Amino acid sequence: MYLNYKKNFFSQNGEDGIIEKILEDLNIKENLYVCEFGAWDGKFLSNTFNLVQKRNANALMIEGNESRFDSLLKTSKKYPTIIPVNKFICSTGNNSLDSILDQNKFPIDFDLLSIDIDSNDLEIWENLKKYKPKIVIIEINSSIIPGIKQRHNPVKNHNGNSFSSTLEVAYQKGYIPIVHTGNLILLK
């Protein structure tokens, strides 16, 4: 059903339109809180910038790469609801997602989390303990057929996380899959 609403304004695979429809179905209209890491300049292939631009969403955008972060700072000057953070996310400790969300006083049940760092995306989400976003968008390796469990492991030359491994974590955290676009979109 949600694939019928695919639209790209900034997203890569139609997520912008799908997110709009999910928010409409959940009756979430104002005071949005979103978080995206692997944010780049805040716009490029972003799953949250459309919400910043159209709905004035409060957006915690995290980017570890210095030059990309410089571009994110420029974007945040034009859009003051963006909170730019220059850190590489870790599974635990001061650079964990829980810690960064705490430091920026985000609501526990904020609206949307978008995870796209082309590596240990699943491990970071799995270690998010305190925060329970309503919607999670997480990159998976779509070339791995469902039923195969694989987690990102560069030592074993495993790039990305499989659909099945991601679903396993999702179910443990109380999420269900809504749609797959290349990213897996899940709902609490």
Image (cartoon, rainbow, N blue to C red):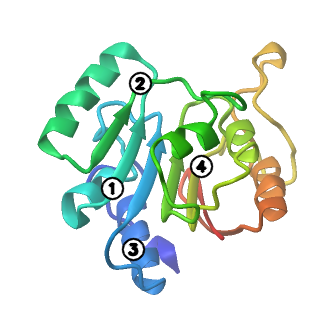
* Vertical comparison of 156 with 136: above or below: above
Q: Which residue is mark 3?
A: 5
Which residue: 77% across, 68% down?
A: 174
Element assignment for label 4:
strand
Nearer mark to the viewer, of 3 and 1: 1
Q: Amino acid under label 4?
A: Ile
Quadrant hosting residue 33: bottom left
Q: In this rendered view, identify the residue nearer to me: 101 or 159.
A: 101
Q: In this rendered view, identify the residue nearer to me: 65 or 183.
A: 65
Which of pointers 4 and 3 lies earlier in the amino acid sequence?
A: 3
- Tell whether 67 sits left or right of 177: left
Across and down, in percent, residue 182 comes to 56, 50
Q: Which mark is residue 138?
A: 4
Which residue: 52% across, 53% down?
A: 113
Within 10 Å of disc 2 (Cα), the crowding (few <14, some 14-19, many 20+) is some
Q: CA distance from mark 3 to mark 1?
A: 24 Å
Element assignment for label 2:
loop
Q: In this rendered view, identify the residue nearer to me: 18 or 55.
A: 55
Q: CA distance from mark 4 to mark 3?
A: 18 Å
Which of pointers 2 and 3 lies earlier in the amino acid sequence?
A: 3
Q: Which residue is mark 2?
A: 86
Which of pointers 3 and 1 lies earlier in the amino acid sequence?
A: 3
Nearer mark to the viewer, of 2 and 3: 2
Q: Amino acid under label 3?
A: Tyr
Which residue: 84% across, 56% down?
A: 168
